[in-house]
Amino acid sequence: MSGKVLVLPGDGIGVEVVPVAVKVMRKVANDAGIKLDFDEGLVGGVAIDQHGTSLPDITLNSAKTADVVLFGGVGGPKWDHLPMAERPERGLLRLRAELGLFANLRPAILFAPLAAASSLKPELVADLDVLILRELTGGIYFGEPRGVREENGEKVGFNTDIYREHEIVRIARVAFQLAEKRGRRVCSVDKANVLEVTQFWRDVVTRIHQTEFPHIELSHLYVDNAGMQLVRAPKQFDVIVTGNMFGDILSDIAAMLTGSLGMLPSASLGSTGKGLYEPVHGTAPDIAGRNFANPLATILSVAMAFRYTLNAGACADRIEKAVARVLADGVRTRDIAGDLTSVVGTVEMGEAVMAAL
Ligand code: NAD
């Protein structure tokens, strides 16, 4: 097995957490006999400073030939004065669009030793492992027509919630394929009682289930009920699949169940299985450059890259077990320290994971 990895640390704590995660990736790949070619590039604010654009052509071209893009974060106060279209964050949005990454995977995993950090009772969330799959390139965020117009002397704002059949088919397939690698259950979330577009979504998901994945359990929930169930009994879910806007909201609710931004990985996949892997958090300018940042979200993103792009589930399991072990041993960065008084830095947390491997 082999693969090409493009490393894009970006700005802020990205340059601290990504190298730690790369070390883990190299070791686990080496031990498993997977040959990975690493390349590194510039994106975000640092790319603006050196190339005058947040996504230089050289970075984009390298990303197009990579199997895995490992991304840190982009942005910071230094570039906040720039017009929207020239900001570092544009680089990430363009990268996602250029790579055709339509499936956004946001696992909400809560390692039992961190259960006290959640806003829910520990017994409701300990060992939580839900995967929210959000459609990322369609729906109301992109639908046309959109805007504000004048009607009968009054202003009217409007957007269009639109899904084409192929967009639902491909995200449904990803959901069922992900469930095959996990708990074999998919819950599709819609508002089919009110919105025609989501009744259509439900019909298409049901057809793909019946014709291609009858061995996976499929259920449907209205989005209001899904939000309620996520905070009532989150462990009932395995994979939740939903459209762009509902996914945006539900994935943030699920993230908060785990209580700590520094622990949350994510992946964005296209139709070829190639993917962009990144922590959910941003560049944390308030702690950047001080060896405070928690690298576990990025390390867990590497685990996702092994599982979903490199088809090396055993490597992913190995990384996740090492993280669980380190947490069980009481090793903590500041953000997840809780009442523990002894905390370690970014580099030391990385070393602890390497030792646990
Ligand atoms: P943020 O996620 O960077 O930080 C929010 C809070 O969480 C801060 O207090 C930070 O110190 C803490 N935090 C975040 N990650 C942490 C970690 N790994 N370990 C310990 N603590 C951590 O969000 P923000 O403050 O809203 O944004 C800061 C910058 O990051 C902005 O320029 C924003 O545009 C950018 N951003 C980028 C991305 C991305 O590149 N994907 C995502 C979100 C925000």
Image (cartoon, rainbow, N blue to C red):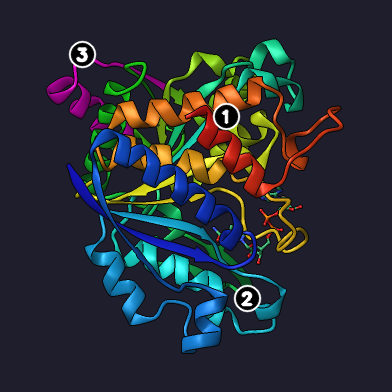
**Crowding at label 2, few (<14), some or many (≥20) Cα neighbours within 10 Å?**
few
261 with respect to 109 (left or right): right
The verdict on residue 29 being magenta is no
- Depth check, mark 1 against mark 2: the one in front is 1
Circle 3 sits in a helix, a strand or a loop, which is it?
loop
**Crowding at label 1, few (<14), some or many (≥20) Cα neighbours within 10 Å?**
few
Q: In which quarter of the image is residue 232?
A: top right
Q: Nearer the viewer, residue 295 or 147?
A: 295
Q: On the rendered image, what quadrant is the N terminus found in?
A: top left
Is label 3 within 8 A of ligand 1 (CB to nearest ligand atom)? no
- As drawn, the label of residue 283 is none
The verdict on residue 202 being magenta is yes
Q: What whole-number distance in Å separates the C-alpha atoms at marks 3 and 1? A: 27 Å
The residue under the point 22% across, 64% down is: 65
The magenta span reads 200-220
Amino acid type of disc 2? Answer: Gly
Residue holding disc 3 = 215
- Depth check, mark 3 against mark 1: the one in front is 3
